[in-house]
Amino acid sequence: MKKSILIPILMLAFLLMASIASADVVTILPNANGDEVDWRDEIPAVAHYLNVDEGSSHDGHTTRASESWIGSRDEYYHFQDTSITGCAISNVRVSVALMVDNPNPEDYGFLIEIKTGGTIYEGTCIYQPSEEYPYYDIFNEDWAVNPADSQPWEDADIDALQAGIGFNTCGLDGRIHYLTAIWINVTYSCVVAPILTTNASTNVNSTGATLNGFLSLNGSGQTWVGFTYDKDGSAPWTNNVTVSDSQATATTFSQIVTGLDPNTKYYFQAWANNSVGFTTGDVLNFTTGANNDPVISARLPADNVLWQNSPINISFDVDDADDQALTVDLYVDTGEHVSWSAQSNDSSFYYNTSYAYNQSVSWFVTMNDGVTNITSSSYDFTMWYYPSLSSPSPSNTESQVSYATTLSITLDMTLDCTNNTVWFYWSDDTLIEKVENAGDGLVSTSAQELAFQNSYSWYAVAGNDNGQNTTSATYSFETESQENIISINASQFTIILMMCLFGFWFYVGYSSEKKSGGAFMLFAGATLFYIEVILLPYVSVIYVIPFISPLAIFIILLGIKKFLYTEPEDTKTRD
């Protein structure tokens, strides 16, 4: 037979077998009168079986067979062949669509009967419920085995089977029984050996591959599928793996195998197994590639000197061209060891840790791809810390800043470094001032002549003699208005005037020997108190009250003494 003709025939055979394997019930209808055809009324008047061959979708009273005499009048029919040779039959159910023509149908029973092996076997008496009158009901009788030999049914038994209706002694005589349909449902299970093919392997690398198969027909029932593989391709196979124990028909199945030798030829074969048999596909092969060693990349720290405050991340990437599962280990000479297992290709690794200032650290990585163990170079770095900047003045969003302010910030070098430098910049990167040889602590610019009521933004950059810079945040402030300056100058003028008056009144009062000198000293003390009140908004209270208040009180007391105890001038004259 030509190949072009054979392939469609095989495909049709597979489809037919699959359809049989997936079915579990077949319905057969009457196709001839049986050995007993005793019922006397047929509508229409044709061969009896033609009136009852519609199955469950019967036409009721339109076509029917009927009998009103009970006695021994039976009606049997032959049925279609099942065409299920080789299958296991688990049940035979005879069903009838029947009506009793009486308002009390439960008085007129009947039997569903079969004839097999030359003998008639009756079911139990059946009675139509009265509430179902005058309608057709469906009644069933089941035989799990052939009653002729008490053995499971066989296809030949079904082909020779007759079934029908009998009366016997199930009820009274004289009522009409209308039979409009009779059919048989045969429950069966056909299990055949599975059919499959071995498909080409995929994803082949140096130590693994994906094995593939296709199950054309699982043969019904539970079906296992899997693969065998080894280096010589003949039984007994070295390796066997089960993929599934319930594989469906017309589906692919695959299995990833690992741990193979690089640059080696392997043979493999798909297999399937069920309760009927074990089948295998063709033997195919593939060759693993040469192994590519994993490599480390994108490592950090990348330099011999690391400028970063602790904690830090030791990080790196591992690439493996074979896309194998990797075991990666990080070793640090401080005794630290971190391991990552079952890592995929192109993985990134991070280890967070802390080290002291000026500490030298050495680290390396080992990578194992299941074939080789690779050790990276050793990478070294020394910890140096960034200088830090804090406590800016003017601080962010500060207002009413003096137009003649200085800019300052606190420098913390963390290290005992020399030649520290701080640069002050406006936000547009214009240099304000460079302060060299700055040490830890407050670093300030000279006084800046700024515009009144204007907004300014500035930042600072700190660097040390190791060449590492730190840039602060940007701080914004607003200068005071000119009116505030004028007000302050007026206060200063008042203070100067009051100081002059204080000096004049104190001198006159102290040097005078008259009673009026005491009054001048009282004026001097009061003036000093007034000067104190003016100074308080501008000078800290700890510098004002402890010095000015006692002096003012002392002068007032001197004035009171002089006023009270100095003799009037006319008294001195009389003396």
Image (tube, rainbow, N blue to C red):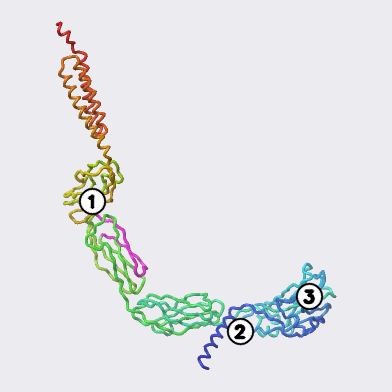
Q: Which residue is mark 3?
A: 110
Q: Point out which mark residue 251 bears.
A: none
Q: Residues within 10 Å of mark 1 (few under 14, many from 20)?
A: some
* Cα gap from disc 3 to disc 2, whole angstroms: 35 Å
Which picture quadrant has residue 190? bottom right
Residues in magenta, as a range: 334-356
Q: Which residue is mark 1?
A: 425
* Cα gap from disc 2 to disc 1, whole angstroms: 97 Å
- Residue 375 image offset from top left, x and y in percent: 27, 69
Q: Which residue is mark 2?
A: 86
- Residue 155 image offset from top left, x and y in percent: 65, 84
Which residue is more in the foreground, 534 or 349?
Answer: 534
- Residue 402 image offset from top left, x and y in percent: 25, 41
| Depicted 466 relative to depicted 126: above or below | above
Tags 3 and 2 in contact by the CB under 8 Å rule?
no
Q: Earlier in the sequence, mark 2 or mark 1?
A: 2
